Amino acid sequence: MDIILVGGGKLIYHLAKKLISKGHFLTIINRDRKQAEDLSREINATVVFGDATNQSVLEDAGAYKADNLVALTQKDHNNLFICKMAMDYFGVERTTALVNNPENEELFSTLGITGIFNITDLVSSIIEQSVVADDVSNLTMIEEGKLSIFQVEVSPDSEACGKEIKEIDLPLTIVLGGIVRNGDITIPRGGSKVQAGDKIVIISLPEEQAEAIKVFGGEE
Amino acid sequence: MFIVIIGCGRTGSLLAGNLSRSGHEVVVIEHDPESFALLPVDFSGFQIEGDAAENDILKEGKIESADLVIISTGNDQINYLVSQMAKLNFDVPRIMVRTIDPAVEKMYEKDERVEIFSQISLLAENMINKIEREGMR
C-alpha cells in the first residue's frame, strides 16, 4: 500500500519502521526541517518537508496515488483538515486521524474519516484500569476501545474461586477466552474449575469489565 | 438577529462593532483576551474568552440559538473545524466563513449551509471589476 504519514516524533518513527517492514511504501510529511532531515536519514521512506495543510505539499507527497493517509499531529484542526483535503482533493480512500480532544471523535467520523484514534480516551482508560486494579492487565482493545480483552487474576476470596465456569453467575456478554495456570493455557468449558491464582482471559464490552473483574478478582 | 462571531482580530472586531451598532445581538469568542481591545468602545455585545474549537466554549456563547455564525480566525484549519462543529454539533442554520488560502475554497463546495468569503478572491474580484468598469469610460 501507498501510505502517507503526517507528523513527527517517536510515534511516526516507530510506526514508519513497522509499516516499512511489512512492505508498504511510505511518504512522511513533517514541517520541522530538522525532524524531516533526521527522519530521511533514519528511515527508508520519502520525506517531504512542509506543511501538510497546504494542497501543494500533499501533491508533492503523491497524495493522488496514496491508498491511505494518516494524520498524527497534536492539533485536531490540522488532522481533520489534512484528512478532508486528502479525501476531497486527491480521492484518498482511507484516512486515519489522531483525535486529541475526545469530543471530536463523532464529528470526525461523521465527516468521513475512516480510522479514528482517540488517544486521550485510550490512554486514560488504560491508566485508569491499571490504577484501579493491579491484578488486572489489559491485553488489547478492539475498534478503539469498544471491545476489550483483558486478564484478571483469580483471588481466593472471589465469588468464582473453586467453582466450575457454569456455576458462576456472569452476564452472557462476557466471554472467557482462556485460563492460564502455571504458564499453561486451557480453553474454558462449562466444567472447567477456576482456582485461586489462575489468570482468566476475558473478552467484554468496556462497561461490563468492572463486573467481570469483581467476579474473578474479588471485591476490595 | 443573534450572531456569534468567532475570532476577534481585525476582521472579527470590525464585524462585531458594526453589527452590534446596527442593532444585532452579538457574542464574540476569542482565545486571546488582548484582542478584545480591538472592539470599538460602543460595542454592546458579549465577549467570551476561550478556544472556539471546544464544545463547552461554543455552548457558553449560546451558539445553539444563533441565527448566524461568522467564523473569522486567521487560521483556515481552525475555521474549518469550527464551521463543522457549528453545523453538525449545534445545527446552526447559517454559517459564514472567512478563508485565507484560495485552495481551501473547494473544501466547502458541498456545504449548503456554509458560505465562504475569501479575502484574496474578493480583493481580486473588486479590482478586476473596477478596472473593467473604468475601461468602459
Image (cartoon, coloured by chain):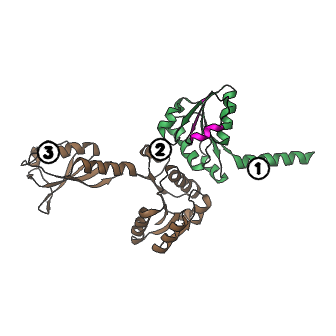
Q: Mark 1 or mark 3, which is nearer to you?
A: 3
Q: Chain of mark 2?
A: A
The magenta segment? B27-45
Q: Which chain is green?
A: B
Residue B7 showing in the rendered view: no
CA separation, marks 1 and 3? Answer: 72 Å
* Residue at the image point whose x is 30% and y is 51% from the top: A127
Please state which amino acid type lies under the numbered disc 2. Answer: Leu
Q: Which mark is residue B124?
A: 1
Please state which amino acid type lies under the numbered disc 1. Answer: Ala
- Describe the element under mark 1 as helix, strand or loop: helix
CA separation, marks 2 and 3? Answer: 39 Å
Q: Which chain is brown?
A: A
Q: Tell me the crowding category of disc 1: few under 14, some 14 to 19, or many 20 or more residues within 10 angstroms, Cα based.
A: few
* Residue at the image point whose x is 61% and y is 46% from the top: B108
* Residue at the image point whose x is 53% and y is 34% from the top: B91
Q: Residue furthest right?
A: B137
- Please give the residue where the numbered disc 3 appears in the rendered image: A218
Quarter of the image for residue A184 reads bottom left
Q: Chain of mark 3?
A: A
The front one of A24 and A58 is: A58
- Describe the element under mark 3 as helix, strand or loop: loop
Q: Chain of mark 1?
A: B
> Same subunit under labels 1 and 2?
no
Do the residues bearing badges 1 and 2 touch, measured as CB atoms within 8 Å? no
The total of numbered circles placed on residues is 3
CA separation, marks 1 and 2? Answer: 34 Å
The front one of A204 and B80 is: B80
Where's the C terminus of chain B, which quadrant?
top right
- Please give the residue where the numbered disc 2 appears in the rendered image: A107
Residue B14 showing in the rendered view: yes
